[in-house]
Amino acid sequence: DVCSSDLVNVGANITAADNAVTITGVTGDIVMAGDALITATNHTASLTAADDVALGHVMGSDVVIIASGGAITNAAGSVMNVTAANVSFTSGADMGQSTRSLTTNVDTLTAQSGGELFITEADTLVVTTITAQDDITLNTLAGDLTTSGLVQSTAGAISLTGADNLIVDALTAQGAIALNAAQGNLTTNALIQSTVGTITLTGANTVNVGANITAADNAVTITGVTDRKST
């Protein structure tokens, strides 16, 4: 374990062979160099800061990143932030940036952001839940994107893109909702609702609408390039 009452700078690799890694910044930040790698082989890697967390690369069976009062950012020079079976992100402010999203190679993801959220996943991903105060932007570079629980933006918009198929559960946003299955089918299984924004569903093949879609006083556009179905 590594614990500091102020700033924790991780400038080189940390490796725990078949054990956990825990790093805590009690009152300050955790700052990883872009080329620094934290490895918790077959165990949990946990980074908890009172303020910001800047991520290099963190690997483990489970990875937990908490920036209680600040942001989680992608450190300059990092090409992958998290490699794990499961990752949980919690931030008091933004999570990633529009110009530099957090990068993951994980199976499942849970996130809670006090600001915006920008995440890019390398492969197939299952999202358990995401809640954010502002905009949510999440995409996969390959494979399917599936949400199995609520994705909610309290005051912003939601944009989800699956490189192949996109399968979504409940989505609620104050702003616009844009869902895109870039090379496959788009399927909705629960209520999709926007308070003041437009809702756009686009599937390269079929769009399967399995539950209600509600845009209060705004437009809904559904485009299935080869097919469109309501079930």
Image (spheres, rainbow, N blue to C red):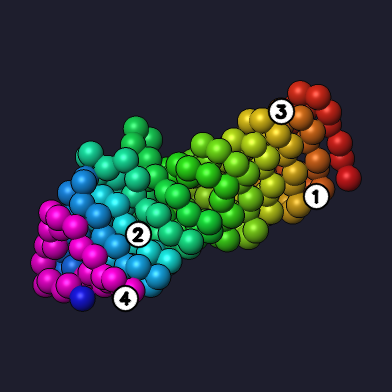
Secondary structure under badge 3?
loop
Label 1 or label 4, whichever lies nearer to me, is: 4
Q: Amino acid at mark 2?
A: Met
Up-down relation of residue 81 to residue 128 (above or below): above
Which residue position is annotated with label 4?
A: 19
Q: Quadrant of residue 163?
A: top right
Q: Amino acid at mark 1?
A: Ala
Label 2 or label 1, whichever lies nearer to me, is: 2
- C-alpha separation, residue under disc 4 versus residue under disc 3: 44 Å
Residue 137 at x, y percent in the picture: 49, 41
Q: Earlier in the sequence, mark 4 or mark 3?
A: 4
- Direction front: furthest residue: 17
Q: Earlier in the sequence, mark 3 or mark 2?
A: 2
- C-alpha separation, residue under disc 1 versus residue under disc 3: 20 Å
Up-down relation of residue 124 to residue 3 (above or below): above
Q: Label 1 near label 2: C-beta < 8 Å?
A: no
- Can the viewer see residue 58? yes
| Circle 3 crowding by C-alpha within 10 Å: few under 14, some 14–19, many from 20 | some
Quadrant containing the N terminus in the rendered view = bottom left
Which residue position is annotated with label 1?
A: 211
Quadrant containing the C terminus in the rendered view = top right
- C-alpha separation, residue under disc 2 versus residue under disc 1: 37 Å
- C-alpha separation, residue under disc 4 versus residue under disc 2: 12 Å
Q: Label 3 near label 1: C-beta < 8 Å?
A: no
Give left or right: position of 144 versus 44. Answer: right
Residue 44 at x, y percent in the picture: 37, 71
